Amino acid sequence: MSEEVKQREPLFSPKNKKLIFNPLSRENPITVQVLGICSALAVTAKMEPAFVMSLSVMVVLAAANVIISLLRNTIPTRIRIIVQLVIIASLVILVDQVLKAFAYDVSKQLSVFVGLIITNCIIMGRLEAFAMGNKPWPAFLDGIGNALGYGWILMTVAFFRELFGSGTIWNYPVMENLGLYDFGYKNNGFMILPPMALIVVGIIIWIQRSRDKELVEEK
Amino acid sequence: MKALRNYIDKIKPQFQKGGKFEKLESTFEAFESFLFVPDKVTFKGSHIRDAYDMKRTMIVVVVALIPALLFGMWNVGFQHYLSHGESVGFWDIFLFGFLKVLPIIIVSYVVGLGIEFAFAQIRGHEVNEGYLVTGMLIPLIVPPDIPLWMLTIAIVFAVIIGKEVFGGTGMNILNPALTARAFLFFAYPQDMSGDKVWIADKADAFSGATPLGNALTGHFDQLPSFNDMFYGLIPGSVGETSTIAILIGAAILLFTGIASWRVMLSVFVGGYLMGLIFNWAGANEYMNIPPYYHLIMGGFAFGAVFMATDPVTAAQTKKGMYIYGILIGMMAVLIRVVNPAYPEGMMLAILLMNVFAPLIDHYVIEANIKRRLKRIKIKA
């Protein structure tokens, strides 16, 4: 922004709105930037852990973005990665402890993957690409937006994997209540295995790119 | 016949560009080349089209599968009546198996071809004959009692994710028929393994374990005799039990030059070698069975003859074929003997080597380039 323009930007200016809504589709961290795939494969066998995971990533990402953005002018460039890591790690430990205290079962299901949020590429990527060069408020919105983009893909994948893999939606036994088992229906064990998450993500990418041709790479 | 030809010629313009049903061009084309020998000629340059086109190749493979299919149908009936302890005539046995296997074949072709046609329409290319073979292979590698809805899901998965995603026939990395079987194996393990599923409507008291199942659980005294396994009088997937029926198919494929003898031979050599290595190690009873047993148990022979030789997914270079084949054979026996979770290693071995085939080719070609560059340098 140039020096002359001093008037305040409204909180939800079109530019800021873009920060939230672009990562949902055009700049989706998973399907377009292909970041954070590992956790998308690991925690999407059921919806509940996937939701908690998305929430944790959202908290960590938004907070880290704000903190880094506040510190952006004081961090020496040469050690910026280590500073970012320290901040992410502290936030992740906080989230981990909170989960252990208040949602022990889910925390046990997520096991090591909460700790592995530290290595989630989305977080490092957003800190480097956005928070280091933007003010706290846009950085906050960017964090929320990307976490939402990450979250909805996670939830979609988890929905299909849980429905066809375990026959439930958010632990509610849909297939049993529909009486499908009486007809000889069986749950698809392949859906529980991580490779199927990769294939479901692939199908989402396929659908997205056939709807939005601009995303298709030139050959 | 003549009338049909005339009729097709009459309605043809409606399906070509600018016609009424232009969108259905590839469907029309598919039916035309199904009914008649394609009469396409080149109109540019001095090229001759060989009559040996994809249609003929695929038909020959289907013909080569027929001995295994017919024997499989008979064996399904034979195993059923054997488990119930009834003895009935040849035609009753065959009829039982025929009625068991026919629905599987019909579902396989209807579902698979349906998807092929749909994709050809959407993408605007011709319907390929590739599925004719896949559609025949799938019924031969599933248990006779497979629920048809499971089969449907597996075929949808295999054709879309295994083949169409990559661009259709000729572009796939994995063998589509094996992809379908792998999907079934991982999705519904209880219907694809164990000793319950290999005999149609089995009597409860009868043990229906396959030779591989027996070997895995350590019941080596219950292994069928060599002759039974060679002729195929054992429980198993529909078309894989009889080594002799498969060898007839292999002879057809080799005689017509469709399958590569390099791949076929080296798969058997690899399996035998691995068996010998295990004999030499001899750490447990499974390692001590004669190496040639591995070649006639389970799906080894079927995989070696019909799956590993798939020209699309196999290695393309001559040296590469040997490496590819030997590794399939060794890997299959290795998985069988060492990994208790997978009684049959052939499917996984072939799929794994399918993935590695381009890499093998790459290094074979690089080595060749290096060798020839050296020759130039010495001369210079």
Image (cartoon, coloured by chain):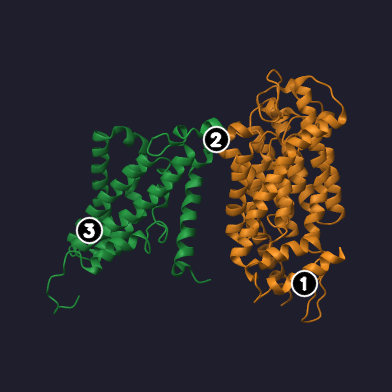
Chain colours: A green, B orange
Chain letter, disc 1 residue: B
Tell me the mark number nearer the camera, choosing from 2 and 3. Answer: 2
Instruction: From the viewer's perspective, tell me whether residue B172 is left or right of residue A91.
Output: right
Q: Nearer the viewer, residue B279 or B45?
A: B45
The disc placed on residue B123 is: none
| Circle 1/circle 3 CB separation < 8 Å | no
What is the total number of numbered labels drawn onto the structure image? 3
User: Of callouts 2 and 3, which one flags the residue occurring earlier in the amino acid sequence?
Assistant: 3
- Kindly identify which residue carries mark 3: A140
Are the residues under marks 1 and 3 on the same chain?
A: no
Labelled disc at residue A185:
2
The residue tagged 1 is B10
Q: Nearer the viewer, residue A217 or B77?
A: B77
Q: Is residue A79 above or below residue B155?
A: below
Q: CA distance from mark 2 to mark 3?
A: 46 Å
Going by the numbered disc 3, the residue's amino acid type is Phe
Label 2, label 1: how many angstroms apart (C-alpha)?
48 Å
- x 77%, y 56%: residue: B58
> Eyeballing the image, is A92 above or below A74?
above
**Looking at the picture, does residue A112 appear above or below residue A17?**
above
Residue at mark 2 shares a chain with residue at mark 3: yes
Looking at the rendered image, the disc whose residue lies closer to the viewer, 2 or 1, is: 1
Q: Amino acid at mark 1?
A: Lys
Which three-letter amino acid code belongs to the residue tagged 2?
A: Tyr
Q: Which subunit holds the residue at mark 3?
A: A
User: In this picture, is A182 found above or below A45?
Assistant: above
Residue A93: horizontal and vertical position, in percent? 26, 43
